[in-house]
Amino acid sequence: MKITRAEVEHVARLARLELSEPELDTFTSQMDSILAYVEKLNGLNTDDIVPTSHAVPMENAFRADQPKGSLPVEEATANAPEHAESFFRVPKVIE
Amino acid sequence: MELHELTLNELHGKLKQKEISSVEATKALLARIDAVDPRVNAYITVRHDGALKAAADADARIARGEIAPLTGIPVGLKDIFVTKGVKTTCGSKILENFVPPYDGTAVAKLKAQGAVLLGKLNQDEFAMGSSSESSYFGTTKNPWDLECTPGGSSGGSAAAIAAQTATATLGTDTGGSIRQPASHCSCVGLKPTYGRVSRYGVIAYASSLDQVGPVTRDVTDAAIMLGAVAGYDPMDSTSVETPVPDYLASLEQGVKGLKIGLPKEYFIEGLDPDVKKAMDEAIATYRALGAEIKEVSLPHTEYAVATYYLVATAEASSNLARYDGVRFGHRTAEAKGLIDMFAKSRAEGFGAEVKRRIMLGTYALSSGYYDAYYLKAQKVRTLIRQDFTNALSEVDVLLTPVAPTPAFKLGEKVADPLQMYLSDIFTIPVNLAGTCGISLPAGFSAAGLPIGVQLIGRPFGEDAILQAARAFERETEWHKRKAAL
């Protein structure tokens, strides 16, 4: 086994995904076979290889620090499930 | 010929000559959508009123003598493109009611030319899939055989071209999502070099791999669409300031003396005999046209799918963290506190494939596994990039299959994600290398399903692959066949 059901539960908590019992079972077996497949990368020696994080070599892209127009608050909050004035409303965080 | 059958370039000619109006063309396309889309399901959203209004605006513009290549052209966009005031779902329940407050750059560029947005096209949820079956809004069917998948994730874009329900479309390609559906639906599909087209306003899946490109009826149309959307954009710091050439200027220059490489690793056992036959015929066609054919090697090909499913899922797990039920998107009705609200909203809003990839990516990035999976994959990505740099220094372009088989049946691979992932084996390496590739119609299987071949170019060598694709198209009739619906 490459991954256990307990590890899958842990990863689901990290990913903020509530998974059902059947989902946990399915994902455990599917992730296990996918991880067994990606194991083939270990057949390659990559000790002296520089990792590629980006397809095109580039430096940081900077622009002048000048304020520009932004979305009006009403438009920025229009898609929110719940909002009040200029705020996004969420369930109570602190008791 | 019916108006809905015309290519973009043909329609542009008729609009310019004032033989027809954009309103007439748009009405014809909308009628075609009403007639056949209930069977194909290429569209998530159709803009009956909005499209006609945009067409009338385009006609006014044409009357003033201001016609650009896309003025008055009815286009469809994959539902991954953020469109101001037009619902944008990305194929997901979590964005079922999302109406963006702005246009992405590619959309804004099309609108600036006066293109008419017919509607938003179906896709795999968050572009994660190879069959369009993971869409929350039902699967798209292949117009050539309604029991088969159109491919994915830009399945709606390709199906709309094959069903003649859009004159031209845009899709996105992270691991083959433009080229593979184009191949399965007998369209031209171009994945530009990473950085060629702005990703601003394109809902992110895997940011180091995603790229915008056209799905069209022929090569000329692909060149026009690419020219319309390509170029540096200050809103996307990964877009590149390389000048955009006139892709039409070099299109007809042929392939005499062009060096075409055949990567030997792509001619594997298990390649479908019909795909093999189409490849052999394409090679013979290019040879007859005066191209020089040479075998080359991409030695790390067998590692590409494994590399992709670590890099792409890691990036996806990070990108999709934004769907938390706070600022936009679905929120659960039954939350006990904030963390519970996140976990339940995401559980209710995401489909199985998206959850699977978030899980895999979170695992690959998690403490204790980062070096073994994510960092390892990034290093192998370097080797895959070097393969392409080496091969494309020996030859000008590469010629390969697009997919190992023609379109598969709906439902055939849903239960086995790994088999689904392996269907992208010939397209994924191009995204990892960051270079460009084009899929073009190159035959049909014994069962009558389309087969495409792929040309791969050097970074920012879109003009070269378009030119080579056009030379093939001139010699063949495959792109002229139409799906019977």
Image: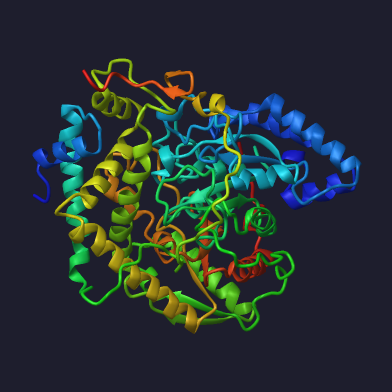
Q: Nearer the viewer, residue B398 or B106?
A: B106
Q: Position of residue B328 (x, y in %)?
A: 44, 28
Left or right, residue B171 beside residue B373: right
Looking at the image, which residue is at 53% across and 32% down? B88
Residue B280 in picture, x, y percent from top left: 50, 70
Residue at 67%, 47% (x, y): give it.
Answer: B109
Is B188 placed above or below A46 here? above
Question: Is residue B374 shown left or right of residue B87?
Answer: left
In this rendering, does residue B51 appear at all? yes
Q: Quadrant of residue B304?
A: bottom left
> Where does residue B446 sit, x and y in percent of width and height?
49, 53
Quarter holding residue B228: bottom right
Give me the residue at 51% from left, 59% from top: A62
List the single residue furthest toward the top.
B333
Query: Looking at the picture, does residue B335 appear above or below residue B318?
Result: above
In this view of the protein, which residue sits in the foreground, B62 or B137?
B62
Is residue B169 left or right of B432 when viewed as pictured?
right
Q: Nearer the viewer, residue B317 or B49?
A: B317
Query: Could you tell me residue B485's position as x and y percent?
Result: 60, 36
